[in-house]
Amino acid sequence: MNNFTGTLSVNDRQSSLPDGNGMRLITLAGTQGLTEAAFAATRFLLETRHLRAGQSITVMGERGTVDGVSVIVMVDAQAANLSPQF
């Protein structure tokens, strides 16, 4: 399991995070179909975790490709902890 931290983008009920040279669509693990998994991920982020577009978040999941689309298959997410760790 990996952690991905970045600024959440939400566009047309689809969420993404920056990844290197582009953006990676966030999908919800265990959901069938790319569109359905992307919509389910956005609902989870906005309604369950109460995150918002423009917020720095950390997504737990795995990188992958679905139907030629770069994705993060998410199992959980939270607001990023940007406080310095000493």
Image (cartoon, rainbow, N blue to C red):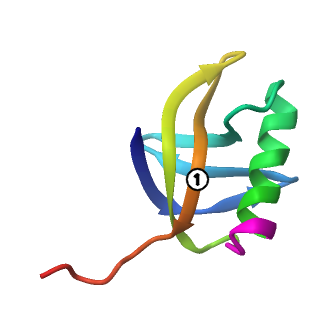
Residue farthest to the top, as pictured: 67
Q: Which residue is mark 1?
A: 76
Q: Place residue 53 in its image quadrant.
A: bottom right
Q: Residue at x 78, y 41 (%)?
A: 38
Q: Is residue 48 magenta?
A: yes
SS assignment for the magenta stretch, majority: loop
Residue 64 point in image, percent of width and height? 54, 25
Residue 74 point in image, percent of width and height? 60, 43
Q: What span is in magenta?
A: 47-51
Q: Residue at x 58, y 53 (%)?
A: 76
Q: Residues within 10 Å of mark 1 (few under 14, many from 20)?
A: some
Q: Is residue 21 left or right of residue 42?
A: left
Locate the N terminus and report the quarter of the image it occupies: top left
In the displayed structure, 63 sits above or below 7; it is above
Of residues 14 and 78, the one nearer the viewer is 78
Residue 9 point in image, percent of width and height? 67, 60
In the displayed structure, 67 sits above or below 61; it is above
In the displayed structure, 9 sits above or below 71; it is below
In the displayed structure, 67 sits above or below 79; it is above
Q: Is residue 74 left or right of residue 38?
A: left
Q: Is residue 20 left or right of residue 86?
A: right
Q: Tell me the element at label 1.
A: strand
Q: How many marks?
A: 1
Q: Residue at x 66, y 41 (%)?
A: 25
Q: Residue at x 39, y 42 (%)?
A: 2
Q: Is residue 35 magenta?
A: no
Locate the C terminus and report the quarter of the image it occupies: bottom left
- Looking at numbered disc 1 in the image, what kind of residue is underneath it? Asp
Residue 4 point in image, percent of width and height? 44, 50
Of residues 73 and 16, the one nearer the viewer is 73
Residue farthest to the left, as pictured: 86
